[in-house]
Amino acid sequence: MRLQENTRLALYSVLEFAAQPGRRLSAAEIASRYDVSPHHLAKVLKRLRRAGILAAARGAGGGYRFVANPKRITLLEVISLFERIGPARVGPGARNAVERALEQVLAEIDETAKATFGSLTVNTMLKLVGRRAL
Amino acid sequence: MIHIKGIRKARGSDLRAIIEIDALISGVRKPAHWKEALRKYGGRSRQRFFLVAATQDGVRAYIIGEVRDWEFGSPSSGWVIDLAVHPRARLSGLATRLMDDLCRRLREAGVDKVRTLLARDNALVLAFFRSQGMMAAPLITLEKELG
């Protein structure tokens, strides 16, 4: 499955911030780590701040810090700020039996993706990152 | 504050608490089901386990697991059949302690993998198993209306 670029950037950022709670990070630092434009990333971080996941850090240099509960917030909550996953797309959009059948299969995939993202908290993802780093 | 006295095998005197925990979560009281579950999983079998978490307030959580050979074509593996924590005893580590104990017993029984199956919309329990390092298994569940 492929997530939109902004969504992936948001997930990378959330995991970077959550891995270093309390530490202030700037858009430029994260942008250089993932080789993306700081200007583009800044827009993503603003949206995360508006959602209460990050807070703007005071003082020289600015930046943000992680303020959400990593044991509670799931990947689905972050993804949902940027794009929609599921529920079933079957409905008026499907004009005939072939379209309806295909939509049903796509909806099945969406539901599975939604359940997967909804079951993974940021804390669990950080554990997974730690295991992958070993 | 929950004080965990220990993890031990379930016994007949725990049935009342187990039925109560399940009823609080599922909304249905199933005394006959739990009596049968205790008979099936609570014996001396080295492949079936029915464990409870005892606290200062009595039994507040339980887990059931077993070793299944060639289930869905897979070599012997451990399965978590059921896991529940009293709503007022959550976030106190009971489920993790039960899971750790069950996994230890499953390893001693000779398996190196543990699986479970649960509803896709059971976000709370799904998130717990994920936090324990469980990932999607190479299995897909299918169903059909028999109408």
Image (cartoon, rainbow, N blue to C red):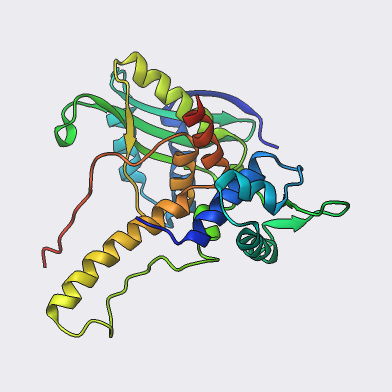
Vertical placement of residue B68 versus A82, above or below: above
Of A33 and B88, the residue lying toward us: A33
Residue B91 visible to an observer of this rendering: yes
**Which of these two is toward me, B121 or B92?**
B121
Evaluate whether residue B88 shows in this view.
no
Measuring 36% from the left and 54% from the top, which residue is drawn there? B120
Left or right: B35, with B87 as reference point? left
Q: Is residue B100 above or below residue B62?
A: above
- Where residue A112 sits: x, y (%)? 33, 56
Which quadrant does the C terminus of chain B fall into? Answer: bottom left
Q: Position of residue B38 (x, y in %)?
A: 34, 32
Given the current orientation, which residue lies at the most extreme left position? B146
Identify whether B4 is placed above or below A4.
above
Residue B37 drawn at (x, y percent): 31, 36
What count of labels does the image hold? Answer: 0
Q: Is residue B32 left or right of residue B63?
A: left
Residue A78 location, quadrant: bottom right
Residue at 60 percent across and 62 percent down: it is A40
* Viewer-side residue, A15 vs B93: A15
Residue placed furthest toward the right: A59
Residue beneath the point at 29% across and 37% down: B36
Quadrant where the image shows the N terminus of chain B:
top right
